[in-house]
Amino acid sequence: MRIFTFTLFLALSLSGGRAFGVSIDESLDKIEETMKASPEEAIAELRRFNKSDLSKAQLVRFDMLEGIYRIFQADYIVAVSSLESALSNSSSTPEKVQILGYLATVSFIQKRYSESMAHISDMLSLINTIEDKDIQRSAYIRLASLYFQMGLFDQVGMYASKALNLAPEDAVKDICYANLYVAASLMRREELAKALTAFEQTQSYCTQHSLPLIATMATKGAGEVYLLESKIALAAARLEQALAEYGKFGFAIEIPSTQSLLAKAFLASGDSAKAGALASQVVANSAADDRALQDAWLVLAEVAAERGDYKQAFDARQKEVEYATRIVDETTAREMAYQAAKFNFEEQRREISLLNSERDGYLVQKETISREHSGALMATTVLLGICTFLSLILALGLSQRNRFMRLAQRDGLTGTYNRATGQEKSENALVSCMAVGEPASLILLDLDFFKRINDDFGHATGDWALKKVVDVLRSELNRNVSGEHILSRFGGEEFMIMLPGISGVEASEIAQQCRRAIHEVDTHYSGHKFSLSASFGVTELTTDDLSLDPMIVRADRSLYMAKHCGRNTVVLDGKEFSDVLMGEPKQGPAPKEAPQAPENIAGNPLAPSVADEVAAAMPLLGGAVSVAAKAQKERAGS
Ligand SMILES: Nc1nc2c(ncn2[C@@H]2O[C@H](COP(=O)(O)OP(=O)(O)OP(=O)(O)O)[C@@H](O)[C@H]2O)c(=O)[nH]1
C-alpha cells in the first residue's frame, strides 16, 4: 500500500494510447504499450527514431517516453530534463498535466517535496481548464495518486471522489482506481469501518470487472485495516491472500510492504517464527520503503527480545527508530512543502481575489460611468424629444394659428380677404402710398341682379357665381397689375380692390378688363345658363384723403352710378369710364335669363331720378376727378 501508488501512477500515466493513424504516431503508441511491460524493449524501439524526422508533437511524446524510461531506471536527472523538454514543447493541456504528474513523482522520489507540490499546483490549475470529462477524470486520479505519495490523505479522498463523480459506468478501470484511493484515504484518516467497507467493495468490484491487481491492492488494504483494528486473524488472512496474488503477478514492488504488515500480524498472533522470517525478507529487500523497513525492524526487535537476544533487539530497535525518525522527518518535510504550497496557493488566491475585486471595482466604475453616460444620453434624448415635441407643438400651434389667422382674415366662400382684413390692409397700403406721394385707387364692384340668380337657380349656383367671379378677378388682377393688389369681399356680392401705385384711369382700365372677363364667363358649368355681369365704382386717392373711408364713399357712389347707368359698367369718380375717357361703347345688356333692367335704369343717358342723385353728389366727385386728372397729367409729363 505504501509503494503501490507509484506503480499505479506509472500504470495510469501510460494508459490510454493515442491513435493518430500516422505510422510514427502508431509506432509511438506501440512503444507506450511496450513501456508498461518491457521498458528496455520500449526504449530500444524508441531509439530507432531519428529525432529530426519527428514533428514537434511527436518529439514531445519521444521525450515523455524517454523520461518515463529514465524514471524506471532511477535516472532522475535525465528523466527530469527529458520531461521538462517535453513540457516546454507541448501545446496540449492534457499532455502537460500528464508530464507535470511525472515531474511531481520524480521530485517526490527525490524527496524534493516543495518541487513536487509546485508541479501538483501547476497540474491543478491546468486540470480546471480541460473540458474533456474523461481526460479531467484521469487527471484527478493522477492527482489523488500524487497526494497519496505526499501523505496528504484529505486531498486523496477529495480528488478520487471528483474522479468518481466524472466517471461513467463503463469507465471500470478508473472507478477501480478511484475507489481504491477513497478507501486508502479513509484508512489513513483512521475512519476504519468506512475504509474496510470501501476496500471490500473495491475488491469485489475490481474482481468482478477483471482487474485482479487492483482487487489485490484492495485485499491488502482490508488486511491493513483489520490489523489496525487488532483483528489479527482476519488481517493475516487478507494479507496472506494479497501476498500470494502479488507473487502470482510478480508484482515485486508491493511485496515488502505486504510482508511487513503480515509479519506484524503474525507477531500479534504469537507466531514469532513466521513474523521474524517475513521481517528478515523485508530488511533484505532493497525495494522496501521506509515504512516497511520500520515495521520489519520493529518485528525483528520484538522477536529478538522474545528470544532474549537483547543486543539484536537493541540494534533492531535502533534501526526501527532510525526509519521512524526518517519517516517523521519526511512527513514533516512533506507537510511543510504542502503548507508552503498551500500558502503560495492561498497567496495566489488572495492576489487573484484582490485582482478580481479590483477588476470588479473597475467594472463597477466602468458600469457607473457607462450608466452616467447612458443616463446623460437618455436625458439628452428625453430633452431632445421634449424639444422636438415642443417644436412640433409650437410648429403645429403656429401653423394652426396661421390657419386660424388665415381663416379669420379670409372669406370662407371665396377665399378672398374678408371686409375687415381687406379694409385694414388697404388702409395700410394707402398710408404707404400717401407717405411717398404715390397714387392709389379703389374699386368697388357689385354683381348685377344677383338676387335673381339665387332666386332662379338656387344659392349653390349663386355661390358658384361668386367663386367664379373671384377666380376671374384674381386672374385679371394678376395679369394686369404688376404690383400689389388687395382683393376683399366687401359684402354679399360686393368686392373691393385696393390698387396701390395705380392711378384712377389705370384702375378703371383694369376694372374694364375685369368687367369684360366677368361678363364673358361661361356659366353653363354651373349647370345653368345665365348672364353674369358686375358694376364697378372706381375712385382715386386725392390729396384731401386722410384715410380709406372717403375713398370707399366715393367708390360706392360711383358704383351706385354704374348700377344706375345700366349696370355692367365702370364709373370712375362719377363718370362712366368708357364714355368719359375711352369712348368705348357700353358692353352687353342685362343677363339673358335674368330679368332685363328697367328701361330707365339700364338705358343711357342716366334716368332723371338717378341723374338728380348724381348731380347732388357732384361737388364731391368733381374734386376727385380733377385730382385724378391732374395726377395723370403729371405722370404723363414726367
Ligand atoms: N348665393 C349667395 N347669395 C348671397 C350671398 N350673399 C348675399 N347674397 C345674396 O345677394 C343678393 C343681393 O341682392 P340685392 O342686394 O337685391 O342686389 P341684386 O339682386 O344683385 O341687384 P343689384 O345689386 O341691384 O344688381 C341677396 O339675395 C343675397 O341673399 C352669398 O354668399 N351667396
Image: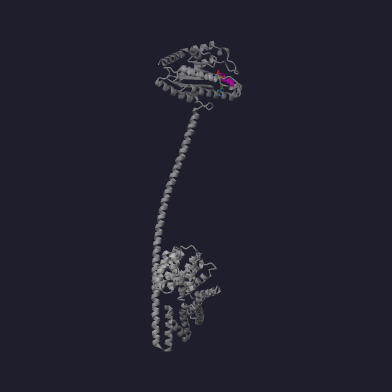
Q: Residue at x 57, y 25 (%)?
A: 464
Is residue 326 visible to the viewer in this orientation of the structure?
yes
Question: What percent of the width, then of the height, locates residue 442?
Answer: 47, 20
Q: Nearer the viewer, residue 280 or 571?
A: 280
Residue at the far bottom: name it: 308
Q: Residue at x 45, y 41 (%)?
A: 386
Question: What percent of the width, then of the height, locates residue 131?
Answer: 48, 62
Question: What percent of the width, then of the height, locates residue 232?
Answer: 49, 82
Q: Nearer the viewer, residue 346 or 88?
A: 88
Quarter of the rendered image showing ligand 1 = top right
Compared with 13, 420 (above or below) is: above
- Magenta region: 448-453
- Asked if the magenta segment contains residue 457, the reply would be no
Quadrant of the image containing the C terminus:
top left
Q: Nearer the viewer, residue 62 or 272?
A: 62
Compared with 416, 51 (above or below) is: below
Which secondary structure is most common in the magenta stretch? helix
- Asked if the magenta segment contains residue 451, the reply would be yes
Question: What percent of the width, then of the height, locates residue 233?
Answer: 51, 82
